[in-house]
Image (spheres, rainbow, N blue to C red):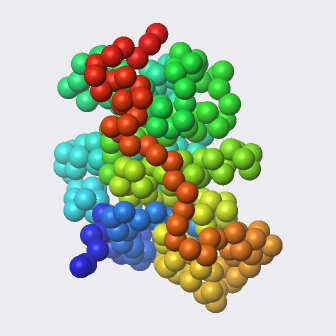
Amino acid sequence: MAQEAIIEIEHLRSQFGRTVIHDDLNLNIYRGEIFSIVGGSGSGKTVLMRQMLGLETPKQGVIRVFGDNIHEPKEHHLEHLRRRSGMLFQHGALYSALNVIENVMQPLRELGTLSESLIKDIAYLKLHMSGIGFEHAKKMPSDLSGGMIKRIALARAIALDPELLFLDEPTAGLDPDSSDGFVELIRALHEELHLTVVMVTHDLDTLFALSSRIGVIADKKFIAVDTPLEVAKVKHSFIETYFGGDRGLRARGALPTNTEQPSIKLSAASSLNQLGLAQGEPHGK
């Protein structure tokens, strides 16, 4: 059975003034995979992600997401994408004037179709799924650690039950233990929610722990797209430097030898029962 391409990029050219970032870049990202984008500084990793989100427009080429050319002058394309995708920004990008629960409620409120009580119940559920306890719901972003900000931002990113999740440097700034826990959370959510994930990261441990496939940008296009171990074998100066150093060798050595991976049980039904929301019980103050 042919794989379903969720994102299709054809002959993309990105240019700012006279500076060309991407030239004839092509890529397909398939349903259910975790696709990671890597490249050197200035290679246009984040630019490409912003173009996939419809936040920036390429100079030439086509980007189709869920079959829609998102840069056509049709507003419903972007609205359709926003409802079916979530984004975790590198530093969380929480609204500083809103507390934790209000941050997670915000995208649900923007729908304009749900009652306030249901919005709050869903937001508490997403916080629970992201490992944030109720005791933190009223805190302001300024009172939170970096790891908590990441988890709350992730809860907001999955608030609308997206099919497609974008992650920009998800473990940047986290200590090793927090990073490992966050990687495990992403893996569990990917499995439980049947997500397709597009990730930009420079962290080799995160890259090898999560990626189904990796795309390496160099020379203004993807020079390699394959599984992590296969990409690491490609003969190219950037790849040899990036994957061949001590950190790259350690990350590859940490790969599991079997396909089984630990999981966190995040069933929505069981979580609702734990929270007392399935029966309409109050979720607490």
Can residue 154 be seen here? yes
The structure residue drawn at horizontal position 56% and vertical position 74%, both measured from the top left corner, is 258
| Nearest the eye: 130 or 80 | 130
Q: As rendered, which of 64 and 146 lies closer to the eye?
A: 146
Q: Nearer the viewer, residue 120 or 58?
A: 120
Q: Position of residue 144 (x, y in %)?
A: 65, 26
Most extreme residue toward the right, as rendered? 246
The correct choice, above or below, for 74 with respect to 228 in the image is: above
Q: Is residue 83 toward the left or the right of residue 234 in the image? A: left
Say above or below: 34 vs 169. Answer: below
Marks counted in the figure total 0
Q: Which x, y percent locates residue 50?
A: 44, 53
- On screen, 53 above or below 285? below
Please name the residue shown 68% across and 74% down the image. 252
Instruction: State the residue in front, 279 or 128.
Output: 279
Q: Is residue 216 left or right of residue 115?
A: right
Q: In the orientation shown, which residue stands out farthest toward the top?
A: 285
